[in-house]
Amino acid sequence: MTQKQWMLTVVEYGQEYGCIATGRSGLQHHHVVGPKGKHNKVLIGPWFVLPIWWELHDVSSNNPNNVTHFRHRFTDLYGKQKLLFAEMVETLQNGGIEVPEEDILFAISLTNM
């Protein structure tokens, strides 16, 4: 699977299920550790992406739980981002949809996000 294919998969997930935290539509794609982020020398940034309701992500939003500005508040309310990611991956796998390679998923699971 390529990074481009994964992003399309995340877009399709968001179209079907909405925001991973709220179920709402009007999404942006949140790169949890930035698009070039690594964990234990494994590139996870392009893969560790969540469909997030724009008000919970956009830099211009003043939502008090915006993950961009208030990551800890977001986490307190919706849970760790790595667990939200795991939930999305599990849903996709149960639907027979390809997900990133196991070493990438494992590295993401080891983050403190």
Image (cartoon, helix red, strand yellow):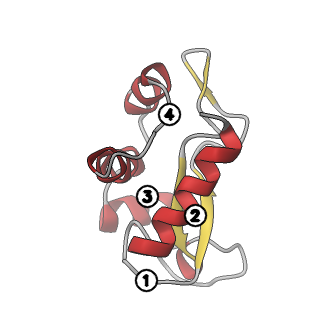
Q: Residues within 10 Å of mark 3 (few under 14, many from 20)?
A: some
As drawn, 99 above or below 75? above
Q: Nearer the viewer, mark 1 or mark 2?
A: 2
Determine contact: label 1, label 4, CB under 8 Å: no
As drawn, 10 above or below 97? below
For the residue labelled by badge 3, is the local secondary structure a helix, a strand or a loop?
Answer: helix
- Distance between mark 2 and mark 3 Cα atoms: 25 Å
73 and 41: which one is in front? 41
- Residue occupied by mark 3: 72
6 and 73: which one is in front? 6
Dot 3 amino acid type = His
Dot 2 amino acid type = Val
Which label was assigned to residue 36? Answer: none
- Residue occupied by mark 4: 100
- Distance between mark 3 and mark 1 Cα atoms: 21 Å
- Residue occupied by mark 1: 24
Determine contact: label 4, label 3, CB under 8 Å: no
Q: Residues within 10 Å of mark 1 (few under 14, many from 20)?
A: some
Whether residue 38 can be seen here: yes
Q: Nearer the viewer, mark 3 or mark 1?
A: 1
Q: Residues within 10 Å of mark 4 (few under 14, many from 20)?
A: some
| Residue depicted at 73% across the width and 35% down the height | 36
Q: Nearer the viewer, mark 1 or mark 4?
A: 4
Residue farthest along the top direction in this orientation: 41
